[in-house]
Image: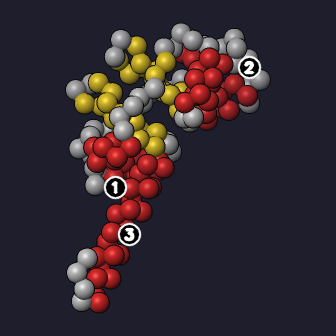
Amino acid sequence: MTVNQILSVKGREVYSIPSSITVFEALRIMGEKNIGAVLVIEETVLKGILSERDYARKIILKDKSSKKTMVSDIMETEVVTVKPTDDLEYCMELMTGKRIRHLPVSEDNIVIGIISIGDVVKAIIELQKSTIQYLDSYISGSKA
């Protein structure tokens, strides 16, 4: 299964913010959209990503004010991306190896979607269910 197949089920909606807003404003948007991370995109260019983890580690634990701190001050600027044609195994290796939970999907340097660790795990579980069902049918002699 590929990233593109996940996006075809999940959808390609991408929420983004500019780096010039406050962390508080970004968190409000994340709360409204019920998302754990938001992309920082300016003029179609991916500049960074802001996650709940960034907020916890760079604001809360350092006793900073989310109303006074700008997104540009705490966002992750080295964003790992994947292509629509990448497979789930590759995505899982990236997420595990780099300890990240969100992967923007880009094509021709334009963000066309985002997948989370939850999306990848869900897709892998569905694949495993299908394989088990197929093998069970094969063993029992019936057609799937």
Q: Is residue 98 visible?
A: no
Q: Amino acid at mark 1?
A: Glu
Q: Amino acid at mark 3?
A: Lys
Could you tell which of marks 1 and 2 lies nearer the N-terminus? 2
- Residue 107 place in picture, x, y as percent: 25, 30
Could you tell which of marks 3 and 1 lies nearer the N-terminus? 1
- Residue wearing tag 3: 129
Residue 89: image tag: 1
Residue 36 as seen in the image, left or right of residue 98: right
Marks 3, 1: nearer the viewer:
3
Distance of label 3 from label 2 (alpha carbons): 46 Å
Against 43, residue 51 (above or below) is below
Q: Residue at x 36, y 38 (%)?
A: 11
Q: Quadrant of the C terminus?
A: bottom left
Q: Amino acid at mark 2?
A: Lys
- Residue 88 place in picture, x, y as percent: 33, 52
Could you tell which of marks 3 and 2 lies nearer the N-terminus? 2
Q: Residue at x 36, y 11 (%)?
A: 43
Residue 100 as seen in the image, left or right of residue 13: right
Q: Name the residue nearer the viewer: 55 or 29.
A: 29
Residue 45 as seen in the image, left or right of residue 32: left
Mark 2, other Cα within 10 Å: few <14 / some 14–19 / many ≥20? few
- Residue 4 place in picture, x, y as percent: 27, 43
